[in-house]
Image (cartoon, helix red, strand yellow):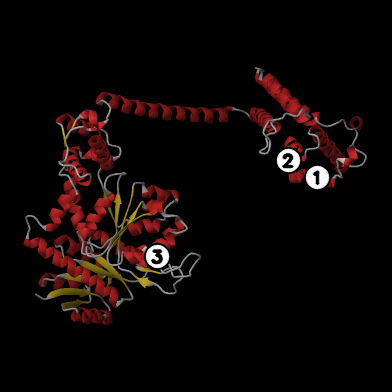
Amino acid sequence: MTTTALVVDDEVDLCRLMQITLTKMGIKSDVAYTLSQARTFWQDNDYDFCLTDLKLPDGSGLELVKEISNSSNIPIAVITAHGSMDLAIEALKLGAFDFVNKPLELPRLRQLVENALKVIHQDSEIQAAPECSPEQKMLDSRLIGNSAVMHPLKNTILKLARSQAPVFLSGASGTGKEVVARLIHDLSPRRDGSFVPVNCGAIPSELMESEFFGHKKGSFTGAVADKQGLFQQANGGTLFLDEVADLPLAMQVKLLRAIQEKTVRAIGDTKEVPVDIRILSATHKDLSQLVQDGAFRQDLYYRINVIELKLPTLNTRRDDIPVLADHFLAMIADDWQLESPPSLTMEACERLQRHDFSGNVRELRNLLERAVTLAETSYIDVSHLGLPDIETELVNTQEQNHSSAIDSSELLARNLENQIDVQSTDQSTKDGEQVIQSSRNIATQVEQKATNLHPYRTNTNHYPSMVQHSSTSNDSSSTNVASTHDEESLLDSTAQQETSKDISGLPELFDGQLPPQGLEHYLQEQEKQLIITALKQTGWNKTQAAELLGTTFRSLRYRMKKLEISEDAFD
């Protein structure tokens, strides 16, 4: 039987080109130049698939996509001009099979038509065996469970498998996102192609571009041969981007272009290579929140999140736990080459159904592997599961929730108290608190510097100096200040102590007069005296003297040369 197609576009030359291409592929086609003509053709004839432009003289191609998708399962592809990707994504959400960009490239058009023919052939096989098709058997054997939440999930997977639209799988860790991604690929017309999974968080950022797009020999140090990237490996198949939220922003820009243009360029190459892939992505993080926080590009988010499929947690499908347990036990027996698969007792099965699975299906399998290891017979009891009593688990859960609620309440109360204190305290009190805090910080820093630890010394020596004396006086002053109850006297005494601390280390200035030789000469003399004092206390060990003064060895040596300080002059 001859395949028929409906082509809808207002450009006569483009319609003629598509009609010639379809004829060479053995497909009979009708051409409509307006939306009204397309509706008339669709009502009067039976077509196997449809190609439509999005912008028509008397309406939008999105209306035709919506009408055809709601009334039949016929694959419909859209033709979009460059720059109208948002309309193409909207068409995919309405049920379009795929899209092709203008200017129209014949190889890309042929790929699209071939994928549509595979979908048509797949649908005919399902209609021939409506009771139990091979696709339904595959779905039931690999996606275990018949609970209420699983039936709509399986139906959605069958619909998504027919489409070429990017799918975003969201759900908690351990819910089986990669299992669903493989199912979508194996049920799709791309089943003969490669399924290439990649964990985006496991690739170093420096190698990410080479891993995704490949490189040419000699393009960088260590590139001893040409290498195909993940996009080239998945050509004709499906690329699964697991943990896509971990992609760095620089790589998100390059990935966006590859998805939008469906072309990639290897590192060191001069031309782009077209690729025919379908993008599936997944993450356990809240991608929309990352977009709001600026950690994920919004345009890439809309490219990969054309259709979102949320996977249920194991706690929402507890009725499937016995079936899942039997499935995993059979897999464990096969992998471990056991004579017969172990089985759960009724008590163990009930205990599993009442357990709170934070790790979902992955946690269930780990529990069963541990139980099979600990069980001495082929029967797994509650004791082999290693789970706490149900009462203890409930109490722990309630205590954790209560503790988190208390912590949140205390934190909120503290924040409110801080805000009230800040608003009610006058500026003088703020200044006093800052003075006290600064004195404490200075004392702490001086104590750390006076410790005199050095990587080349095996013991710790303490050298008496004016710095240590200052730190001791500061500590005692801080204690006296803290014991003062009157706030005004506290501020006055603190200010006096800060002033006395600042001038305690310097000699008196000529009975209160200014230095006759100027400030610069006076400061150099004081610096020289401090350096000489530190050198004498350490036996002219420059490294230890530098630590005592809180500076570096190179800085001390420079200052000694500048101030003309030498050991020979003071012998």
Residue 336 visible in the shown view: yes
Q: Quadrant of residue 406?
A: top left
Q: Secondary structure at mark 3?
A: helix
- Frontmost residue, 437 versus 183: 183
Mark 1 crowd level (few <14, some 14–19, many ≥20, 10 Å Cα): some
* First-in-chain label (1 vs 2): 2
Amino acid type at circle 2 is Thr
User: Percent from the top left, x then y, of residue 76?
Assistant: 21, 67
Q: Report the residue marked by disc 2.
A: 551
Amino acid type at circle 3 is Phe
Total marks shown come to 3
Give the distance between the C-alpha atoms of the residues marked 1 and 2, in whole angstroms: 11 Å
Q: Residue at x 36, y 28 (%)?
A: 400
Classify the position of the N terminus by image quarter: bottom left
Classify the position of the C terminus by image quarter: top right
Q: Mark 1 touching mark 2, by CB under 8 A?
A: yes
Relative to 407, is 363 above or below?
Answer: below
Q: Quadrant of residue 135?
A: bottom left
Q: Residue at x 31, y 64 (%)?
A: 234
Relative to 45, is 281 above or below?
Answer: above
Give the distance between the C-alpha atoms of the residues marked 3 and 1, in whole angstroms: 56 Å
Query: Furthest-right residue in view?
Result: 516
Relative to 86, is 357 above or below?
Answer: above
Relative to 454, is 246 above or below?
Answer: below
Q: Report the residue marked by disc 3.
A: 213
Left of 532 or right of it: where is 8? left
Q: Report the residue marked by disc 1.
A: 559
Q: Secondary structure at mark 2?
A: loop
Amino acid type at circle 1 is Arg
* First-in-chain label (3 vs 1): 3
